[in-house]
Image (cartoon, grey):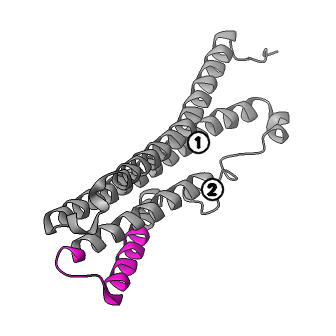
Amino acid sequence: MKEEHSPPVELDELLAAEFNYIAQTAAQANEDRARVSSFYLIAVGSLIAALFSTQLFDPDKFTQTVNLMFSGIFALLTVFGASTVMQLAQLRSAWHESMLAMNQIKDFAVSQSPELASAFRWTTQTLPRKYKRGSVSYYRALEVAIIGGLMFGAAAYFFQQAFGPANLATWIVCALMGGLAAWVQLKIYKKLLT
């Protein structure tokens, strides 16, 4: 009679260690998402506060050079926003890869002990998609994209202000440019995750 072969203890320890490592990488990806978006928000907020605390908001001091400088600064903040959105997408992707790796270990455990199948809520088939509009990651990207859009709208305002006074057309162009920048950043986020 053939003896049933169970996995050696070392294999159990190896799988447990691998599972713990993957869980830590998933948690780290979530922490990094919070850090990345918070850093961008703090950078934008600090710059805005610094600009409002200067004496540059005296209308007599707004030369063409100052307006162009502000336009450049706000355009740069828009680029940083797009970079932050890309980082958020990569961190969501890293989290998703960690979940797939955990599910691979769970699938192996279920193949060894089928009674474990009912113990796991997330399986490879039920794992949330990488791109999910209702996820915290998406909301963070949306927040950054909206702020990035505002920054681009401000860049457009100061650029136009450098060449003439503001009027209704200036505000319409700024709103359209800001909305377009936010939309493009969200499209980048989606493209990186689909």
Residue marked by disc 1: 100
- Find residue 167 and name its label: none
Residue at x 21%, y 63% (from the top left corner) = 61
| Quadrant of the image occupied by residue 69 | bottom left
Identify the residue at horizontal 50%, vertical 37% (top origin): 32
Rendered location of residue 101, percent (x, y) = 57, 37
Dot 1 or dot 2, earlier in sequence: 1
Q: Residue 180's x, y, as percent?
A: 38, 75
Q: Nearer the viewer, residue 106 or 186?
A: 186
The three-letter code of the residue at mark 2 reads: Ser
Q: Residue 25 falls in which quadrant of the image?
A: top right
Q: Is 104 a magenta residue?
A: no
Labels 1 and 2 touching (C-beta < 8 A): no
Residue interval drawn in magenta: 160-184
> Label 1's element?
helix
Graded by Cα atoms within 10 Å as few (under 14), some (14 to 19) or many (20 or more), the crowding at tag 2 reads some
Q: Mark 2 — residue?
A: 135
Query: As rendered, which of 145 and 151 lies closer to the eye?
Result: 151
Residue 17 higher or lower than 132, as above or below: above
